[in-house]
Image: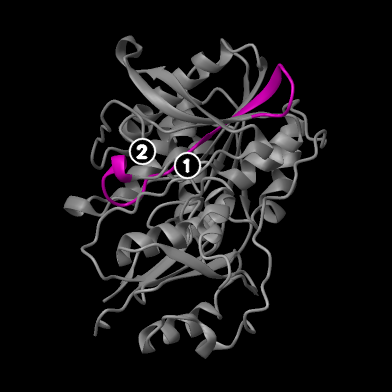
Amino acid sequence: MVRVLPSVRNTTLGFIVCLTLLPSLAAEQVYLLDYRLNEQIVQVPAGKGGHARLQTTVFRPDGPGPFPLIIINHGKDAGAPSHQARDRFVYMATAFVKRGYAVMVPMRRGFAGSGGRYVEYGCNMTANGLGQASDVHDTLDFARRQSWVDSDRIVVAGQSYGGLATLALGTQDLPGVRGLINFAGGLKDNANRCDWRSELVRAMANYGGNNKLPSLWMYGANDSLFNPELVSRMHDAYVHAGGTARLVEYGAFRRDAHGLIGSREGEKVWWGETEKFLRGIGMPTRELYAVAPAPSMPKSDFAPLDDVDAVPFLREAGRLAYKEYLSKMSPRAFAVSANGAWCWAEDGEDPEVRALANCEQKGGQRCRLYSVDNNVVWRDDEPGKQSTMTLAVSEGKGANTTVGGSAPESK
C-alpha cells in the first residue's frame, strides 16, 4: 500500500510518500545537533509553579553574548501534539544567527518532548491563542535571565498556530520585546461545525484592541489554510480595533505558501520585508557571522539521475514512484531498502532524514539514500556509511514525504 503522509498545518513542512509494509506508526526521527549553529536543547520551566518543562531548541553565534534574541513559535500538526517532531526552523534560524541573534524555538506544553498537557478551547480562537501565549511568556521570562541574551532587544515571531499565539502574546506588557512577526498565523478547526474563520476574525479584533507592540504580517496567495479574503478580514479586524500591523501579501510560493519559513527558498521572500520591520524597531540586520554550508553527500557515478531501471531493489510500483520523484522540487531525497521499501521526501527541512526515517519505519529494515536533490549518491562499496552521514546533518522537520515498499508488492 502506498501511503501519503500529509503535512496539514504549518510548516517547516513538505511532502512524504512511502510504500507501507508494516502497520502505520509514528516514525521516530533521530537527529544530531547542528554544530554550525551551536544548536542545543534546553528545558524551560513553564506553567503553574514552573513544573512543566518545554523542550526548547537554541541556536546562537560563537561567543558569550549577550545577543539580541528572536523566539520562533511553531504550529500544530494533525494528530496528537505529543507525536509532533521538534520544530527547529533551521533556515530562518541560520539567517538570524548570521546577523548575531540567539534563536529560541520552544515546543509548548504537550508538544513533542515537552512536559505538561496540551489544552485547547475548541472553536474559541481567542482563548486558544492566549492559552498558547502563556508558554511563550514563560520562555521570555527564562530568556531574560540568561547571560547570553540581550534582554532589551527581543523580537517574537510565529508561524501558523504559533503566529496566533504570538499576536495573543502582544496583548501583554513585555519588557524588552520590540515587535512581533506573524507568518501565516491562525488555526483551522473543522470539528463540530465550528465557524473557525469568523472566530479567527473575532480573535484578531480582541488582540488588536489590546495590542501593545507593532507587528508585521506575512501571508501568501496560495496558503492552503488562510486565503487572501480571510487574511484581509483578520487584518482589518486587528487594525480597526486599534492594533498596529503591516500586512504583506507576497503572492504564491511554491506548492503552499503556508510553509514559507520552513523552506530553503523562503528567505528570498520573507527577509526583505522582515529586514525593513527590524530596522524600524531598532533591531540589527547586518550580517556579522559566517555559517558553514550544511554537510552534503557527494555525488556518485553509480548511474544517471533519470535512469529509473538502475535504482536497486525496486519493483514496478517503486519505479513509478521514482519517476514521480524526479518531477519534485528540491530539496528532495529518495531512500530504498533491500526488501523493496522506498520513500521520497520533498521540500521542508532535511528531506534526507525524513526519507530515511519513514522508509525504515514503513519497511521494517535499514534504508539507504539513492538520490539527493539532482544527484545520485548511491555507492555499492559503502553500504553502512550513507545513513550515518545523512543523519549527522541536523534535525529536520517535515515537508512532503512519500513511502513505499515490496515483499510482496501491494495493490
Does the stretch in magenta take in 102?
no
Q: Give the amino acid at mark 1.
A: Asp
How far across and how far down the image is residue 113, in percent?
Answer: 36, 34
Q: Residue at x 39, y 65 (%)?
A: 359
* Residue 46 found in image quarter: top left
Q: Nearer the viewer, residue 87 or 285?
A: 87
Answer with the quarter of the image where residue 264 lies. Answer: bottom right
Asked if residue 78 is among those painted magenta in the image, a careful observer would answer yes
Q: Is residue 257 in sight in this rendering? A: no
Q: Is residue 410 left or right of residue 112?
A: left
Name the foreground residue: 290 vs 141: 290
Mark pair 2, 1: CA separation: 9 Å
Q: Amino acid at mark 2?
A: Ala
Q: Which residue is mark 2?
A: 112
* Segment colored magenta: 60-83
Residue 337, compared with residue 102, is above or below; it is below
Residue 30: x, y in percent? 43, 46
Dividing the image into 4 quarters, which one contains the C terminus? Answer: bottom left
